Amino acid sequence: MENQKILHPTNNFNSQSKIPAVFIDKDGTLIEDVPNNVDPQLMQLTTGAIEGLQLLSKAGYKLIVITNQSGVARGYFPESALVAVEARSREILAEAGILLDGFYYCPHHPNGVVSEYAIACECRKPKPGLILRAAAQQNIDLSNSWFIGDSLCDVEAGHSAGCKTILIDKGNQSESQISCLEIADYIVSNLSIAAQAICKHSLANLG
């Protein structure tokens, strides 16, 4: 079994020219966090998600979800349930004219109860395995790409892959984590502000 999972990548890229991407954590960043939820009807976009992703799409970034889904390893839901989760993610974004270029997930956890998934893998964030796989499959320029997430785990994964990072800070970081927040390139409150920061950064660094 592969240690890195992907559902339905988009592969229609020009192999001669690498493309920047914005990698996005799912739960708490793109989709409101309902722990271990795989019910598509309970999925709702976070504040600023539509505005932010529309802006990034217009700026030419690929949009790719990178998510830990240890509920599979923990026996909370089967891996097959993630098919509907991905489909609903694509559907609600498509309603706003946004194309999702990839949906990559890690079903593993070393302390899982389902033996097939109870492994120490290279795809579970904060390791960068899924980001690296997406980059290889979709011809992505990691040096000009970003990772947006709501945990330091996301920030570490992004930096390990060579991306710049943005932390969505919802005020739920511990004191020890707060002291480490400076490792993120930007700290903002939602995806809309994150997208604006990325576009301003890109303009400031032209030429």
Image (cartoon, rainbow, N blue to C red):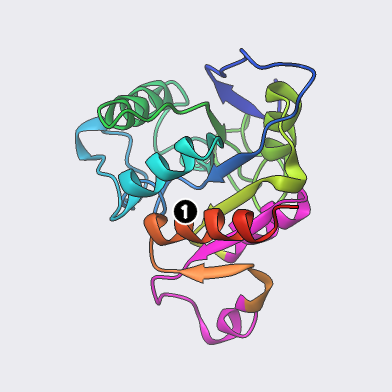
Does the image show residue 121? no
**Element at label 1:** helix
x, y (%) of residue 54? 38, 40
Q: Residue at x 41, y 55 (%)?
A: 191
Check if residue 35 falls in the magenta segment: no
**Magenta segment range?**
152-181
x, y (%) of residue 15? 76, 16
Name the image quarter holding residue 41.
top left
Query: Is residue 129 positioned above or below 148 on the image?
Result: above
Which of 194/148 is in front? 194
x, y (%) of residue 33? 34, 53
x, y (%) of residue 199? 53, 53
Query: Is residue 86 positioned above or below 142 on the image?
Result: above
Which of 118/52 is in front? 52
Does the image show residue 204? yes
Check if residue 162 falls in the magenta segment: yes
With 12 as the anchor, is 82 left or right in this view?
left
With 197 as the anchor, is 158 left or right in this view?
right
Q: Tell me which amino acid carries mark 1.
A: Ala
Farthest top residue in view? 12
Q: Where, quadrant-wise, is the N terminus in this rendering?
A: top right
| Mark 1 crowdedness (10 Å alpha carbons): few <14, some 14-19, many ≥20 | many
Name the image quarter holding residue 159.
bottom right
How many badges with numbers are in the image?
1
Q: Residue at x 73, y 39 (%)?
A: 129
Farthest left residue in view? 41
Query: Is residue 101 positioned above or below 145 on the image?
Result: above
Q: Residue at x 38, y 55 (%)?
A: 192
With 37 as the anchor, is 197 left or right in this view?
right
Q: Which residue is mark 1?
A: 195
